[in-house]
């Protein structure tokens, strides 16, 4: 009975697919459960308001939270205008030439370049060459390079989704190209661009390796007061705690992860909300 | 018509500014190449190229120093093989499930969940490997070391799985539905359609997904730094501690290595190798995607 | 004894090596409605889009021969395409309002071109002429995308009128609309011809017969027949015109 055999194989295959899919979701659940279980006992008001400490029960995230906030704000200020401008050129102005295709491929390669290489680049250019030392500036500029290709690709997608008919309508009214692009196309693409920008920036919040390379400190017991101050960030603090042998520091790391994931979750939620709420095109 | 001349000039100015922004992306890749190239040349003026590439002992920080990169490469290799052998089969099965079996509603739940999995910072995966995966491995194989390759490649596999799934899913959905319908009309089962029709037709882009996922695993840093250890050795035993290229760079950066010394230069030589590997894989991967996209 | 506003002399349009319009000559009379008919792919939209240089965005297009607007060469070296588009407005196949308010849809064109107006008056005038005022006067600041398809198309006409053009080009303006909305647009065209010259492409011969004064029949890139609409439909001179309007092909 050849057909029965086929049927059995097919059923097994179906369940294989199904179990894999649920398995992936289950792993996500286990990961979150494990972290909450380990970290929840350490979450307290002090955890947010204390500086790091040798004594686990006194240790807190204050300087790391402040550092992350500084670095991300500066990163966003630097990279958003650059990235969005780049995507505007690529989508609206770029000549359909071979070298533009190379630039496009270059950007997608940059998006896939290991983050640690960005760290070395930042170390050589910003920390050493421009003498910014281990400052917030150096960190933000390094992360900007890292996020740039990601923002470019995301914004390109948003701009591409604006129908050509909008551009035609603009030109037919006697508009110049920049008027069509900046007064019609970009405003129409704005919700998509915003979503992409928030998602890409949230990626930078979780970045650890490049900041370790450029020398984000692991023990900072003060708040940065300006962009030339040294700093630490949440993931570096988490790394520091996680790589200590003591159990209690692992608990702190888990609590730090809970804070980090909460921030990321809120940013993702906002991004998706903007996309759902403000996307205008249905045609 | 002053207003008109003005608006024309403004247009030209804007265009020039935008071009400058675009050229920045070229400058970034250019400076990576120059930087890694320059420092690597410096390194190879002190360490022979063949000793680096084929030497089997990596002890740049201890006397007598030795700069054979093979232990780091084998560490990275172990992570890549382990993680892709998790991510590829499961990633493909999930992609087939999503494109062949799942309802629209189910898709719309699963896809964001997978995106969350992909968006979790790698330091979190490292923590998960160290405090959750390793204890489990230890209870099965008591000889498991505290830091071990297996826990790291398991979490890296989880991390790159969404990438395999989403790129393959895109590839499957880009196929004309007539292809599938034709096979189903001949009485084929979903298994036969998937294995004999869909996978071959989408093979180029599935390969691209695999290559890009491998490249991601090669460059993965934090999870392996936390969970796999700092013990460069030539081994294929996943229960032992190892060191990858990326983890080595982190290790040196955490210490106080003086600038300009040969220890410091090793970072750039290793990074240069890392760059060549990942860049060529990314180029190949995007070439496959672009090539197929043209048809 | 009406004067001509657009004149083509041996106009040829190439897409790469492919000659889409093969040396056509015609004169479009001021203040009349000219319908351009023909089977799809005959080059009628290409000709229409060359009047306001909307073909400029196609990369491998080449245009030769003479094409003038009020005596000025449209493809002349000194002609600024943005300027010609102020005088020759266009309404597209599918309604394409900007994703902004009704009000902003209308004032954007005149504003970027540096015109000075009392904007409220301009909006009211344009909407009245486009027979849309009564339906939208209480929600001028709502999104244009909330309007129905027919209303959106009339808004696009109002937006064009607000530029005070001399010519309005319409590229199958009713093809995406239901019969009721189509009838309203056709009535509107009858109103508009008092003030503007209108050139409309349509694949609907009844529509051409209903609304136009002159009709041009294009076939495979050639202008087969051009003349008074009544005559062309009742007594075509060319065999191919007769075959087309009686439905033998197309």
Image (cartoon, coloured by chain):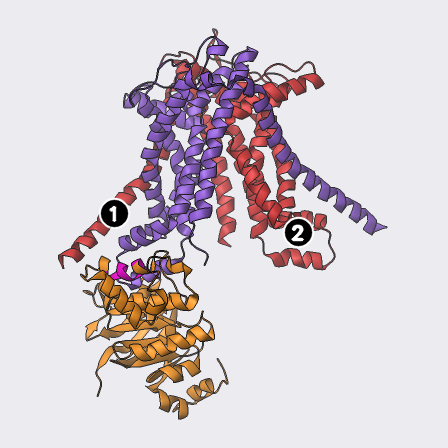
Chain colours: A purple, B red, C orange
Residue C244 in the image: above or below residue B240: below
Report in which chain the residue with disc 1 lies. Answer: B
Label placed on residue B128: none
- The Cα–Cα distance between marks 1 and 2, rounded to whole angstroms, is 49 Å
Q: Quadrant of residue C225?
A: bottom left
Report in which chain the residue with disc 2 lies. Answer: B
Q: Quadrant of residue A32?
A: top right
Residue C181: say if magenta.
Answer: no
Disc 2 packing (10 Å; few <14; some 14–19; many ≥20): some
Residue B137 in the image: above or below residue A205: above
State yes or no: discs 1 and 2 in contact (Cβ < 8 Å): no
| Magenta region, residue range | C104-110
| Residue A231 visible in this rendered orientation of the protein | yes
Q: Quadrant of residue C71?
A: bottom left
The answer to which of B19 and B286 lies nearer the viewer is: B19
Badge nearest the viewer, 1 or 2 = 1
Kindly identify which residue carries mark 2.
B197
Residue appearing at x 36%, y 78% in the figure: C187
The answer to which of C247 and A169 lies nearer the viewer is: A169
The answer to which of B279 and C166 lies nearer the viewer is: C166
Kindly identify which residue carries mark 1.
B14
| Residue B57 visible in this rendered orientation of the protein | no
Which is nearer the N-term, disc 1 or disc 2?
1
Quadrant placement of the C terminus of chain A: bottom left
Q: Position of residue A79 (x, y in %)?
A: 34, 35
- Residue farthest along the top direction in this orientation: B63
Please tell me whether the stretch drawn in magenta is mainly helix, strand or loop: helix
Residue B102 in the image: above or below residue C55: above
Mark 1, secondary structure of its residue: helix
């Amino acid at each position: 009975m050849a057909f029965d055999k086929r049927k059995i194989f097919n059923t097994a295959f179906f369940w294989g697919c199904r179990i894999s899919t649920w398995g992936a979701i289950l792993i996500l659940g286990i990961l979150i459960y494990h972290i909450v279980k380990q970290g929840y006992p350490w979450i307290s008001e002090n955890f947010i308001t204390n500086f790091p400490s040798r004594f686990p029960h006194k240790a807190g995230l204050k300087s790391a939270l402040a550092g992350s906030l500084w670095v991300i704000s500066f990163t966003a200020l630097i990279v958003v205008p650059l990235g969005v401008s780049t995507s505007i050129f690529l989508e609206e102005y770029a000549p359909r030439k071979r070298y533009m295709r190379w630039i496009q491929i270059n950007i997608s390669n940059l998006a896939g370049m290991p983050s640690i290489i960005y760290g070395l680049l930042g170390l050589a250019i910003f920390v050493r060459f421009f003498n910014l030392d281990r400052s917030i500036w150096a960190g933000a500029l390094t992360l900007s390079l890292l996020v740039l290709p990601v923002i470019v690709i995301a914004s390109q997608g948003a701009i591409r989704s604006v129908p050509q008919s909008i551009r035609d309508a603009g030109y037919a009214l006697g508009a110049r190209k920049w008027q069509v692009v900046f007064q019609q196309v970009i405003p129409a693409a704005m919700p998509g661009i915003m979503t992409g920008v928030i998602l890409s920036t949230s990626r930078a919040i979780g970045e650890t390796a490049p900041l370790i390379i450029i020398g984000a400190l692991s023990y900072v017991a003060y708040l940065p007061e300006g962009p030339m101050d040294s700093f630490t960030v949440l993931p570096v603090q988490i790394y520091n705690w996680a790589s200590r042998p003591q159990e209690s520091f692992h608990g702190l790391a888990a609590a730090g992860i809970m804070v980090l994931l909460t921030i990321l979750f809120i940013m993702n939620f906002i991004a998706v909300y903007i996309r759902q709420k403000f996307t205008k095109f249905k045609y | 018509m002053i207003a008109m001349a003005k608006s024309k000039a403004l247009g030209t100015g804007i265009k020039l500014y935008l071009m400058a922004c675009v050229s920045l992306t070229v400058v970034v890749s250019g400076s990576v190449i120059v930087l890694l190239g320059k420092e690597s040349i410096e390194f190879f003026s002190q360490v022979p190229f063949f000793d680096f590439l084929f030497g089997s002992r990596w002890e740049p920080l201890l006397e007598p120093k030795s700069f054979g990169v093979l232990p780091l490469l084998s560490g990275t290799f172990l992570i890549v093989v382990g993680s892709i052998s998790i991510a590829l089969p499961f990633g493909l099965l999930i992609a087939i499930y999503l494109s062949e079996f799942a309802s629209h509603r189910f898709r719309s739940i699963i896809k964001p969940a997978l995106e969350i999995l992909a968006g979790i910072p790698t330091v979190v995966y490292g923590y998960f490997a160290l405090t959750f995966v390793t204890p489990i491995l230890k209870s099965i194989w008591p000889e498991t070391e505290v830091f071990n390759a297996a826990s790291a490649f398991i979490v890296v596999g989880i991390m790159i799985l969404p990438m395999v799934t989403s790129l393959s899913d895109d590839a499957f959905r880009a196929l004309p539905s007539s292809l599938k319908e034709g096979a189903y009309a001949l009485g084929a089962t979903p298994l036969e359609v998937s294995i004999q029709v869909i996978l071959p037709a989408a093979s180029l882009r599935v390969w691209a997904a695999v290559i890009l996922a491998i490249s991601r695993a090669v460059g993965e840093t934090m999870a392996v730094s936390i969970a796999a250890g700092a013990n460069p050795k030539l081994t294929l035993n996943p229960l032992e501690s190892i060191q990858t290229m990326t983890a080595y760079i982190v290790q040196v950066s955490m210490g106080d290595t003086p600038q300009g010394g040969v220890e410091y230069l090793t970072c750039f030589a290793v990074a240069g190798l890392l760059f060549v590997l990942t860049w060529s894989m990314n180029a190949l991967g995007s070439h496959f995607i672009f090539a197929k996209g043209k048809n | 004894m009406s004067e001509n506003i657009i004149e083509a002399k041996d106009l040829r349009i190439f897409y790469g090596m492919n000659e889409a319009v093969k040396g056509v000559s015609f004169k479009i009379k001021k203040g009349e409605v000219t319908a351009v008919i023909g089977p799809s792919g005959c080059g009628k939209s290409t000709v229409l889009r060359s009047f306001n240089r909307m073909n400029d965005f196609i990369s491998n297009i080449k245009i030769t021969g003479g094409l003038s607007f009020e005596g000025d060469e449209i493809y002349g070296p000194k002609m600024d395409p943005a300027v010609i588009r102020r005088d020759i407005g266009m309404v597209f196949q599918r309604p394409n309002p900007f994703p902004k308010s009704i009000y902003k849809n209308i004032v954007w064109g005149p504003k970027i071109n540096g015109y000075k107006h009392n904007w409220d008056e301009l909006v009211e005038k344009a909407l009245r002429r486009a027979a849309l005022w009564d339906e939208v006067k209480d929600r001028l600041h709502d999104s244009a995308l909330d309007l129905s398809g027919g209303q959106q198309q009339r808004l696009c006409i109002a937006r064009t009128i607000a530029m005070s053009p001399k010519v309005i080009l319409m590229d199958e303006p009713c093809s995406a609309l239901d019969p009721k909305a189509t009838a309203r647009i056709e009535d509107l065209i009858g109103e508009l011809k008092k003030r503007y010259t209108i050139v409309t492409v349509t694949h609907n011969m009844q529509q051409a017969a209903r609304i136009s004064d002159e009709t041009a029949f294009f076939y495979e890139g050639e202008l087969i027949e051009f003349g008074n609409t009544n005559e062309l439909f009742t007594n075509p001179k060319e065999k191919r015109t007769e075959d087309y309007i009686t439905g033998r092909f197309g």
